[in-house]
Amino acid sequence: MPSETLYTSNPVIEVSHVCTRFGSTVVHEDVNLTIMPGEIFAIAGGNGSGKSTLLREIIGLHEQTEGTIRLFGQDVSGLGEQDAQNVYRRLGVMFQQGGLFSSLTLAENVAVPLKEHTDVSSELIRDIVAMKIATVDLPMDSAGKFPNELSGGMRRRASLARAIVMDPELLFLDEPTAGLDPIIAAGFDDLVLQLKAVLGLTVVMVTHDLDSLWRIADRVAVLGNGTILGVGTMRELAESRDPIIHEYFHGPRGRAAQSQYGVS
Amino acid sequence: MVESSSSIEPRICIIEDMIIQCEGAWTIPNLAALDHALQTIKWPDMSELMCDTMKISAMDTGGAVLLHRTLMTLRKEGRRVSVQGLRAEFGELLQMVSCNRSRIDEVDVSEPGYLSQLEQWGRQKSQQAVRALDFVGEATVHVSGALRRPSLIRWRAVFHSLDRDGYHALPITGLLAFLMGVVIAYQGAEQLRQFGANIFVVDLVGISLFREISPLIVAILIAGRSGSAYAAQIGTMKVTEELDAVRTLGLSPMQLLVLPRVFALVIAVPLLTVYADILGVIGGALVASSQLNVSGVEFVGRFEESVALRHFFLGMGKAPCFAVIIAMVGCYQGFQIRGNVDDVGKRTTIGVVQSIFLVIVFDAVCSIVFSWWKI
């Protein structure tokens, strides 16, 4: 990781003093995060710790109760229609359930951003779409299938293909490996690394997957008790004295993943 | 990625008869222009070409696909093309494109022909017919089993359904039936007055409501209100794997979900029909007294002598049949949902349309049969 270049440029995402409440339930209390271009940043934490809510807030799908979130230096909640569209064109989101349009085939789903936002000829669109489908390692004969004919893992890949079809600068992944078998999950990790290397993406992902965290995350933020318990590389977090972080990374599964990725 | 040196316009052109000069940002926003330029370019008649990519300032997958496609077309024509000056990161991108390209080309993505589409349609329809028959058969077996052993019927569910689909439908059914009575009497009033046959409004209202309008209005309302709900409820249970859970717990979805709904409607629809009959006649009687000077007493007197009881029973006889059609179609469509949410809406709509269609077809058949039998 070329850290010098990383820290001289402007942050892609700045989350400052964000509080979120659903009625009387407090989800976040004073959450602060800075994500720099070119890094793979993971948001980890237990079930119900508000990871997905934070992701939704960063993307602008849900409004925080207090605080500001800046995407590419722009305040997300104050964006007008046009500005929001411009921001959305620079990012891609892979949803956990896929978020694929069920009335369109896989190929048509992937083609949507190209068709709607560019005037590229349909022939070239087909080439690019086929390219992306191949990139995410989906079999070509699935291109004509509808989302309900695809398995969960394939749907997620298709969602990823759609998210990267415009070559965005920023890619959000919501639990990319949850519910995938270990081989496919590892393949997914490789895929994210490859995309980052080739396309120079900044990746923000929400995940539980300790293997994934060890393998691909440059930095990790651990959410718990409504706030960020710690931010840093996995090595740094593994040495954290915070009881929740310790529990999270040194439970039986955490130890297995840790020993596998070569940390004493 | 795009920002750097965007001063150079993206373009592709031939210089010195053998060098393909590529410049600027080869990114998705510029693809349309580049593609257009490529369409009009005239390739020189040389067997060896050089592609100078030094001045490409930015490239994304779209640009790489376009460049790769161009190179491939040229190479297919038997020319040798060498690429020079490509930045390392773009080279990697191009490498990825060509890697995946070979996989794409293996697959034929042509559309199926009309004949095979027709075949598929036929197969689908026949499969649907078989599934529908299957469902009717299974339901019949369960119903006859339950009739022989009433303890098998889930009475709690039946009463719950009766409450929701029968009792709660009273206001809307009553209002509509009342209005239908009013409408029929009004429409008849003008014609009857011309002939001085005011009193026949009683026959008009009584017979048409009892025989046709009330059962139909109730059936259509219930199809929209409950038939759709059945499809959506069962469909949602399918999507959330509740149906699978029911099966693995050793319970029968038929017994648990379908029978109570069928029984509830078979009880509720005839009762609602009687209720609709009464309110419809009241509506007709009000119009008769206000528009045709047929007093309430006269109306009731004429009603007794002219509207035979058989009209009432014919209507009442159809009501439970309608109920069975609505409940079965609703439940059947619910079971046909295939694990996705989009399907729920589609199947619900199909369920309503189908049940109203079948109700009216059944009604038409009844009319023909009754007229043969002269009743």
Image: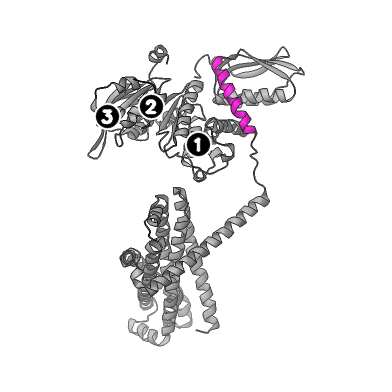
Judging from the image, mark 1 belongs to the subunit labelled: A
Q: Mark 1 falls on what kind of element?
A: helix
Chain that bears disc 2? A
Q: Chain of mark 3?
A: A
Residue type at mark 1: give it.
Ala
**Residue located beneath label 1 in the image:** A158
Q: Earlier in the sequence, mark 3 or mark 1?
A: 1
**Residue drawn at (39%, 25%) of the image:** A260
* Quadrant position of residue A108: top right
Q: Where residue B135 appears, x then y in whole percent?
A: 48, 63
Q: Which kind of residue does numbered mark 3 sit on? A: Glu
Q: Amino acid at mark 2?
A: Leu
Q: Position of residue B212 (x, y in %)?
A: 46, 74
Disc 1 from disc 2: Cα separation: 22 Å
Identify which residue is drawn at 53% across, 32% down: A137
On the picture, is B114 further left or further right than A233? right
Q: Are marks 3 and 2 on the same chain?
A: yes
Task: Residue A213: give its label.
Answer: 2
Range of the magenta residues? B86-106
Q: Is residue B98 magenta?
A: yes
Q: Main secondary structure of the magenta part?
A: helix
The answer to whether B318 appears left or right of B54 in the picture is: left
Given contact means CB atoms under 8 Å apart, are the residues at marks 3 and 1 in contact?
no
Q: Is B267 placed above or below B74 here?
A: below
